[in-house]
Amino acid sequence: MRDSLRLPLSYSDQELNGILSQSDTAVGKPGLRLGRILNNIITNSLKQNRPVYFASTVGAGVTADWREHLVREGMSTRVVRTKTGDSIDVQRTLENAGTWRMATAGRKVEWPACMSPILRQTSWLNLYYISAYLDLARRFQSQGDLSKVDDWCRRSYALIEHLEDPQRAAQIVKAWLSLNPNSERRRN
């Protein structure tokens, strides 16, 4: 992969063989081998101004070394050079989390309409969207825009509501209450 895909991995064949011969255990993180290789790729990519993204489905253990350099952009997080306390790019998240782009070219369709009935029932997939939506709600709450808080909390609730999962629905309502205790929309 390093050679055929021009993967920005600076280890020589000999160094890679040495890494691959090491023990590969680490509690709560990717294996030591994977971690070293991943960190090398990311560091070199950033030096070359090449974008690096993690999908939302990638566990926190894999991204742990880069946690302070991650910016959410919807269903992915981008790795940036500088540390950031601003862990969400609102504009990109609005563009990427609000729609599912597997539709006719140029036409944006709300993502649940594009999914098969089987995937619509996959609660773990919904949780990634819910997480992005609640991150947007938190950001808008910090900016004092409570109508947008309600909008994104409502979208979060709508994703879980059809799954008939009262525990998760209650968690979303609790989050909504904490973000906007006076919301009229939440009561409806």
Image: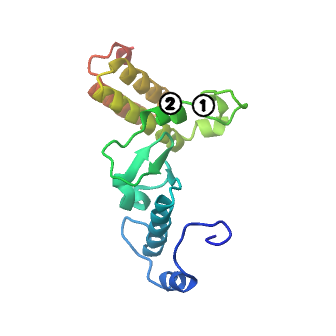
Question: Which residue is at 46% across, 47% downward?
Answer: 77
Tell me the element at label 1.
helix
x, y percent for residue 47:
47, 61
What kind of residue is marked 1? Pro
Indicate which disc, 1 or 2, sits on the residue closer to the N terminus: 1
Of 7 and 161, the residue lying toward us: 7
Indicate whether 36 appears above or below 124. Answer: below
What kind of residue is marked 2? Leu
Q: Is residue 181 left or right of residue 113?
A: left
Q: Is residue 4 left or right of residue 97?
A: right
Tell me the element at label 2.
helix
Residue 104 occupies which quadrant of the picture?
top right
Of 140 and 43, the residue lying toward us: 43
Query: Which residue is label 2 attached to?
Result: 159
Q: CA distance from mark 1 to mark 2?
A: 8 Å
Density class for disc 2 (Cα within 10 Å; few <14, some 14-19, many ≥20) is some
x, y percent for residue 149:
36, 24
Circles 1 and 2 in contact, beta carbons < 8 Å: yes
x, y percent for residue 8:
55, 67
Question: Which residue is at 47% across, 26% downward?
Answer: 155
Indicate whether 69 appears above or below 26. Answer: above
Which quadrant holds the N terminus? bottom right
Density class for disc 1 (Cα within 10 Å; few <14, some 14-19, many ≥20) is some
Question: Which residue is at 53% across, 28% downward?
Answer: 162
Query: Which residue is label 1 attached to?
Result: 112
Residue 35 occupies which quadrant of the picture?
bottom left
Q: How many numbered tags mark residues here?
A: 2
x, y percent for residue 120:
60, 35
Question: Which residue is at 34% across, 13% downward?
Answer: 184
